Image: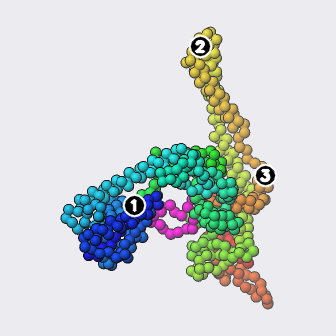
Amino acid sequence: MKVAIYARYSSENQSEKSIDDQIRVCRKYIQDNVMSVEDRHIYVDEAMSGSIINRPGLQALERAAENKEFEAVAVDDLSRLSRSNHQMLTLVMKFNYLQVKLISVSDGIVADDDNAKLGIHIRGFINELYLDDLKKKTMRGLEGQKIRGFSTGENVYSYYTQPVGELRLNKKGKPKYDGMAHKIQPEETEVVKMIFKGFIDKKSIGKIVKELNNDKIPTKRGLPGGWNMSTVSRILKNEKYTGLWIWRKWKNVRDPMTGKIKKVVRVEKEQLTFFKENLAILDKDIWEKAQKRWQEINGAWPARKKSKTHSTKQKSYVHANPTHLLSGLLKCAQCNGAIVLISGKGSGYYGCYNARRKSCANTLLIPRKRIETAIISELKDKLLTVENLEYVYKNLEKLIAQNLNGTPEEIKKKKAQYEKILSETQNYLNYIKMGNFSKAVSEALKDAEIKSEGLKQEIDSVAFQKSNSFQAPPKEWINHRLERLNETLNKNTVSSSLALKELLGSIRLEPVADKESDIYSLINNNEREFKPYYVAHTKIQTLALLDDKHKGSNWYNWRRR
C-alpha cells in the first residue's frame, strides 16, 4: 500500500525538529505494517496554525489524493490535520470519498475501522477545546500586558516601540524585557498632521496621496512613493492619534462553509479603552472637523447602478464637492445624461458626456464662463431682484414680530416667579439670622439662589430679543450685495454650488437646431448662417415668503454664438 505522510507544527516558537519527529513516527508505523512511502509524498506545513484551512502542504496533499497517487495518509495525530473539529471532520469525509485511508498513528485510529468514528469525533472535540483554551490563555496574557501599558503588537504610523523594564533571560535563555511601549515618531507625526490639515481643507484623498508620493515621503515600511488611498483613509479614521486606544475592538469570525475570515466589531463590554495623553498628537477640534468632513463625503464616490448588497444610494463625488458653480447640475435633455466639462481650453467647455462616448447626438458645446454668467444674470433679473429680496426681508421681519408679540407677557410671568424666589430667599436668610441653622435650610437656600439666577438670565435674554429683533435692511444695502453677487459666489465655490443646486434643482439643457429660428449671424456676401443654441429648463425652488406675483420664471434660454 502506497502511503503519504503529512506533518505540521503551528508557530515559529515551536521547534522545527517537530516535523522530523512526526515523520519518523509515521515512517516506523508504515514499515511495521508492510507499507511504502516515497519522499515526494511527504507533505509538510511549517509554522502554520491548525485553524487555517488554506495551507500549501495540505492543499498539495489533497490534490495528490484526488489524482489517486497513494492509497493512505498517515499523520502523527489528528490535530496535525486541523485543530478545528469541523475542518478535521470535513477532511476525513473527503479522504473517505476519495477512497484514501486516514491513519492517525499516536491516536491509534484508522479511519476505515468500524470503531474509528467515535474515536475521531472525541479526538476532534478535544483538539478544538485545546485551541479554545489556548486562545483564552493568549488573550489573558495580552490583556495583562495592555493593562500594564505595553504594546500588544499594534503597528501604527507615527509611533514606534521600544523595550522597557528589566532585562531578563527567559526559559530558553533568550533576553526579554518586561514589555514594549509606544513612543511618538516626530517626523511621521508631522506627516499625520499634514494629512489631517489637507483633508479638513477640502482636499480629496487622491490629491493628498499624490502630494505625499510627489514629495517622496516614506511610508511606515520606509517605501518612498508607496502611499495609497486606503492607507491615508485608515490614518484619517484612526482615533489613536487623539490618545484614545481601543483594544480588542474587533474579532475574527470564520465562515464554517468556506473557511473565510471576516472582522466584526465586538460588543462594547468586551472592549478595553485607554486614554494615553502622552501619545496624543491631534487635538479634539481637528479630529471632530475631520469626522465632519467624512460625513459630508459619505457615499460620495463614483455613481453606480442598483446594488443588491447596499441600501445606501451612492452619489458622484462631484455632488458633494463641486469644483465649479454648475458642477453636477447640468443634464442633457436629449439623452438625460450628465453635461460635464469636456474641454479644458480656456475656462473649459460644457458638453454632453454621452455624446463624447458616441451614445448621444448632442455635440453642442458652451463655454463654462458664459453659461455661469447667463445663469447668474437671469437669477438677478428674474428672482434675486431688489424688490423680491426686500419683500422677503419685510415678511421675515413681520413673522419674527408676530412671534415676539407674547414677549411682554412672558417677561411679566418670569418677573413674578423671580420676585417670589427672592422673597423665599429672604425668608431663609431671616431664619438663619435668628440662629436657626440646619443642613436642610442651607440646601433650600442654595436651590433658591440657583433658581433666581436662572430666572434673571432668562428675563434678560427675552428682553434682549425684544429690543434687538430682526429689522429689514434698506434697499441700498440689498442693491450693494446684489452688485457683488458674482464675487460672493466665487469666494466659496463649493458652498455656492450647493446653494444653487438647492435653489435651481437640476438644469436640463435642450439643444435647439430649428432653422426656422431667427438666431442667425451674417457671413460673407450677406448670407445668413444658422447658429445652434441651448434652452435651459429648471424648476426654481422659491421661498414660501414669495407669493405668486413675486416668484420668478421657471425657464431661461441662452445661445452659443
Within 10 Å of disc 1 (Cα), the crowding (few <14, some 14-19, many 20+) is: many
Give how far apart the Cα atoms at labels 2 and 1 are. 73 Å
Residue that badge 1 annotates: 51
Is any part of residue 505 visible from this angle? no
Within 10 Å of disc 2 (Cα), the crowding (few <14, some 14-19, many 20+) is: few
Is any part of residue 269 visible from this angle? yes
Residue that badge 2 annotates: 437
Give how far apart the Cα atoms at labels 3 and 2 are. 63 Å
In this rendering, the answer to whether 167 lies above or below 27 is above
Could you say where residue 496 lies in the image, as x and y percent from the top left?
A: 69, 60
Could you say where residue 95 lies in the image, as x and y percent from the top left?
A: 29, 70
| Residue found at x 76% / y 53% | 478
Q: Quadrant of the C terminus?
A: bottom right
Front one among 539 and 280 = 280
Give how far apart the Cα atoms at labels 1 and 3 are. 75 Å
Kindly identify the amino acid type of the residue bearing the numbered disc 3.
Trp
Q: Which mark is residue 477?
A: 3
